[in-house]
Amino acid sequence: MVFENVLNAAINGFSYGMLLFIFASGLSIVFGLMDVLNFAHGAYFMLGAYVTWTLFSTTHNFVIALIAVLAIGVCVGAATEFTLLRPLYGRPVYQILLTLGLFFVVNQLVLFIWGPLGGYLGPEDIGVPQVINFLGADVYLYRVILAVAGVATAIALYAFLNRTNIGTKVRAGSESRELAEIFGINIKTLGTAIFGLGTGLAFFAGGLAEPWVGAVPSTGTDFLLLGFIVVIVGGMGSFSGTFLGAVLIGVVYEFSQYFLPEITFVAPLLIMVVVLLVRPSGLFGRGKS
Amino acid sequence: MKFNQFETKMRERTEHEIAILLLAILASSAVLTILPISPVNAASTTKVIKIGVVTDLSTAYSYYGDMEVNGLALGLAYGLGVTNVTAAVKSTPNLVNVTGGGYTFELYVADGASDPTTTTEKAVQLITQDGVQILQGAPDSTATTALEGVAAQYHIVFFAGPGADYSITANTFNVYTFRMASNTYQDALTGGAYAVEHMGRSVAFIAPDYSWGYGEVAAWTDVISANGGRVLTTQYAPVGTTDFTPYINNILASNATVLIPAWAGAGAIQLYQQLYSLGVYNKMNVTSGVPDLATFDSYLAKYMPNYVGMMKYAFNLPNNAVNTWMIQNYITLFKAGKLPEQNAITFPLPDLFVPDSFAVGQAIVAALNTTGGNTTPANMIAALEGMSLNSPKGPMYIRPQDHQALQDMYIVKTVYDNTSMQSYYSSASQFPTGNVWAGILKTGYIGVQLIATLNGTQTAPPIYPGTAGQPRPPVQTTTTSTTPSVSTATSTATSTSTSTATSTATSTLTSVLTTVSTVVQSAGTPDYVYPLVVVVIIAVIAAIFVATRRKPK
Amino acid sequence: MERAVPEFEVMRTEALTRRFGEKVAVSKVNLSVKAGTCHAVVGPNGAGKSTLFNLICGVLKPTAGRVLVSGIETTRFPPHKIAALGVGRSFQVLSIFSNLTVLENVRIAAQSLGRTRTNLNPFSFAYSETRFIEMAHEALEVVGLADKSPLPASVLTPSDKRKLDMAIALARKPRILLLDEPTGGVSIEDIPAVIGAVKNVREKWNPTLLLIEHKMEAIKSLADFMTVMDRGAVIAEGTTGEIERNEHVQEVYLGRTA
Amino acid sequence: MAGTTAAAVLSEFARSRWLLAAFVLMSLLPLVYPSLYWLTILCYLFTMGLFALSYDLVLGRTGVLSFGHAACFGLGAYAVYWVYLAGYPFWLAVATAMLLGAVTNVAMGTALRRVKGVYFAMFTLAFAEIIYLYLEKQTSITGGTGGVFSPRPDFLQNPALIFVFIGIVVLAAVFIACFLVFSYMRKGARVRGAVGLVLLACLVGYALYSLDSSVLSQLQAPINAFTVNAYLLSALLMFLSYYLVSRLSLSPLGAIMTAIRENGERMDMVGYDTFRYKLVIMAISGLFAGLSGAMLASLASFILTPDVMSATYTLNVLLYSILGGIGTLVGPVIGAFVVEFLHFNIGNIASFIGVPSIANWWMLIIGVFYVAVVLLLPYGIVGTAMMKGRRTLDALRKAVGGGESRA
């Protein structure tokens, strides 16, 4: 029993961490390049879950639905940046307020379109058996798959940031906007693209989360907070920091849920507070403010 | 000198700000007077009764909110003896009119969003602005408790809604509160007894980790131990939990024969899905309340196969004339898309909480017939206490002690049902366009089948000590004015929130004040004297001020 | 012209060292500044001059070595304490209160002399403490901005902004004044005006000047002593005359500017 | 000596005569227009206005972005509940609330020594959320999610109290009258003085006239008396606090705050211990936040839930500030008025403009509102008004004959 719980907690923790990573890496990249603290990210996550739900009920193919939702997310994000965020660079408080506004708008729209009850796909709906027996323990197969998908996404992102041309531009921009502009990088267009990518990741995470946490209006807020914690703990704009932060928070979250439910929601916050007091700009932060 | 310039600049700045503040305040207070303070009443020949319904139209409970409003409207129509409901029930957003039998009921529907604070704000607004004379409550128990307090403060009769917490007619009860819906204790008496008799004597609970969960578990535990069962373990999971595996494992480890999940709202899907996928149904009997048909069929049915549990109401459970009337007219309005709160997910037949609010409507009309249309709380309370009426759920009796309506409760088994819907709808074309349920006409749906009916006395919850003895406001004969600006309250009756000022001091003081002002007014002094007096006073002060002022250099 | 200087030193750094990771920005710098002199620190970009200033002012904490201001060790002091010892500092990258008026810029600096009790008294007026305003006026007079005092700082010309930056540092009459490229970003024709301002400060108040400068004419006309730095280390010290005759310096530094 | 103090007092009143005028105007409302509905709402507006004011000290004046302000607010509110229900006098409860607010804010502020900028914002967010999540669990002391009924002091239900307030108001009116006469005496300001006098006279006159037996008899219901008294008390507290804060911004500390906002590093270099000053400001802001919380608990709200500590309130106050104009003390107050006014009257407005259904779309409206404010009003209402409308205001003053009254 204890072994089963520990095993499950470990698996869930890691895969929840991966989910958080996919979600938070969007936040992190966007902040790194554009210093935008995107409060709408959580709403996009929720929207992603709902859209995936709808797409699946029409296409009956989860993978296609996921790819589609990623594409939709990229478009939505790019549109947002291009139309709304452009005028607000260098004014963090205003960006926060704007994205907050978007957060509320998206929430209400979701209520309009899908109603308040939310939607839920069981893993068996998408053709994955609920539980498999692993070393005598009941293990949720979908969460293992989710973990694998998360690692794959992480690798893909890493390759994108370090191997591709645009990736190097992004990293240059994150180091210093001015320098990047001097070297002839069109930071604005890059910003649009990256915000699109970030939002796409939020949608994608929402889609992946659908068979686990489901599509309920409250998920947006919960994930937004957790995402911020991950990004802050890891250090804003740091890829490896985000990854480790996500795993850390995910594992702590799940283990506390299994063995100390009272502190489930407080533990991540406590971690963030402690980390900030010890390292004011996160574990891997470059202290850029 | 330079710094003087700066100081004056500074002053000027703050002055500008304050000037703007003044302007803004002026503007806003101007707007206040423009906006409609109280809507124009309908034709004066019919008696207009205003009912405020503070419910939920936007969050996860909004489906219950819809049921509440629809039920109330239908119940009023039934009580007024309306024959043509489509003509009688007129609904615009947030305002529903039910006309008939010499009455016009105006239902002011407000969205409390299942948040106590918002709910009280909306309730106070309905009372003080729209001047509602009767209040009806919310799907959420905490919000309902808050509404009790509002009703007591503003001295108007309040009907609790789907919010089923036992404490509403127990710990926090006050005489202005009535409840036609069944409460959690009645659920427990129904389901708990059955569970112990037919399923097993050793019980395990899983419940959310907050007051509602504790209340549920407490009630069920009482009943179970009273019936000779015993509780082996109770698992409390935090609200928002999505992974119940550890709790389920603990429950399985406890070797209980019966599991009673007491879970509402978010997470219920995950809970039942994990109960299902971890094979709990094969290892032990699971029972608890069966939710409303819409939620059940669209989310939970596939994880609750041939489930047996208690149920508050489903359209096919009771069999009486009132229920038939309600179903027929509900369908009439539904087909016309004329239900007061109707949207894509509205179920084609009256669902879980419709009959309770229906009974509220009946009770209101009956009480008004007794009091001759007088809505002062004293008369209403006197009329409602001990009232019995035939509701869609059969006979109901409002207990005078705690104002809880005793009523039939049901034990049901969930079954696949593709016949009963056809008996009401001939073809899917009769559904309003966009309604998500159009499909189930041919596919059928997971419905419920009656196993047993427990009558009101069998499911009568204990009377909480102290509820009975509370003082009633004295009965008045004259009807009171219902100006929106002030609620005329005569007694300092019990209030759950604050200790009211001692009535003697208040009355004496006020009498003094009134006499003073009446003297001033009866002195025959014309109105324009007052401004003049003020001007004179100001002038005198000004003169003194100027006289004693040093010469500015 | 070489002026006679008293021998006691108001500031000394001993083996001052600061590393950023692998990179050594300042290594074992021994600096000794005599009272009343103008001491120029010169060197190519990245020689660690500004880092040295930051170490002296307490913005950065040294990896090793110590700083003494008039005999008191200030190595671990926070910036405001060092400022309280009479160390004023102007910045290479302009650092002024752009949205305040010129006078307020300097007045607020002077107000830092006020006792905490008065500074925290919510019922006194910032402008009723006239002595700070007078101090501000003096500082503005000495750099030659008196006539511009009511203007908002943001509208000033670059050279005036330099002067204002200097005036802020001068507001509380520091005994040591650290000027970080006072002529930086100033157009050629305005440079004499700025240099004039610094000269004027020396004549009127005679603070000890520690100066970072690239412009040779500025150094010639202002500095008594020079310290030449390269890659964080001191490569030559001496009076302006000596340094000018030093070939090593010639090819390291002057060679590049000339 | 006496002469100078009297002169000082007079100059104080001279500075704040507009404020006095606003106060008198608002305080006479219950007599002129006795609507429980509006009094209840305005009481809430005043509370939120004060909350926004306290936030502007931190964000607007000092430039510190804090997301934990709701903690001071909520703890203040609950402090009143705890202390007052423990049987201590009301004023003591309010004092405790203010103290608790200050302590909370300082506790958060201590992190400022190391944590900066966005990281500090997130730190405070976490700090407040932890307090919130913890106290929400403590059902016995906070009532859990359901909350508790607000403690309403008995003396506020005494109808006689209203006359105390009316006394205060009359006093204020008298002072205004003095200054109007004063300005009338001054050459050139005659028209304004005369107009002002007449307006004031009519206002007070009408107020006294409309104070008739019908209003008074209605005051015997405790709830009515309470509503009127709570309204007047909240108005008094709000305007008093506004006066104090605007006074503070003229003091040396005010100048320091502005300079820290403009360029904190330089402030360090010229010899200020900016960290310590920031702590002081956090404390002062916390005091007022606690006071506003106390007002919410005892005057403005019917029930008290732990949500008052949640981030929702911080985000609201952020919106107030941005809408009104950061750093212009009055801006956030007006922002709070506008937002909450919309919030409460969205139903009325909806039916007023003939689309009643939008009454239930509050979240959408507020969201669009956020976006619109940020994009269209970059400096907020007051900020824009003070930049663009300065000329207009001067022209106005000239028109009413006060043109050269400035020194």
Image (cartoon, rainbow, N blue to C red):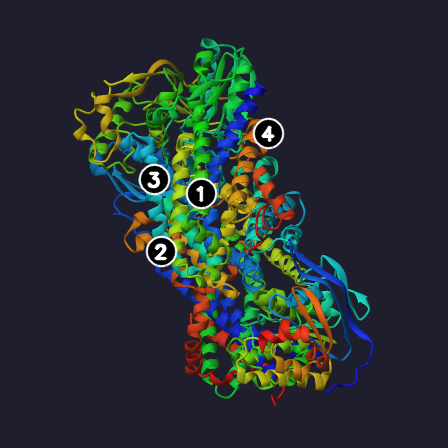
Please name the amino acid that badge 3 sits on.
Answer: Val
Q: Residue at x 42, y 52 (%)?
A: A99
Nearer to the camera, A74 or D88: A74
Say if mark 4 contacts mark 1, CB within 8 Å: no
Nearer to the camera, D302 or A256: A256
Q: Is residue D274 above or below residue B236?
A: below
Do the residues marked 4 and 1 share a common chain? yes
Circle number at residue A69: 3
In front: label 2 or label 4: 2
Give the image quarter of residue A188: bottom left
In front: label 3 or label 4: 3
In front: label 2 or label 1: 1
The residue where tag 1 is placed is A159
Point out the tag, 2 or 1, that comes first from the N-terminus.
2
Under circle 4, the secondary element is loop
Point out the tag, 1 or 3, that comes first from the N-terminus.
3
Q: CA distance from mark 4 to mark 1?
A: 38 Å
- In the picture provided, is D107 more to the left or to the right than D150? right
Do the residues marked 3 and 2 share a common chain? yes
Under circle 1, the secondary element is helix
Circle number at residue A82: 2
Circle number at residue A260: 4
Which chain is mark 1 on?
A
Q: Residue at x 44, y 54 (%)?
A: A169
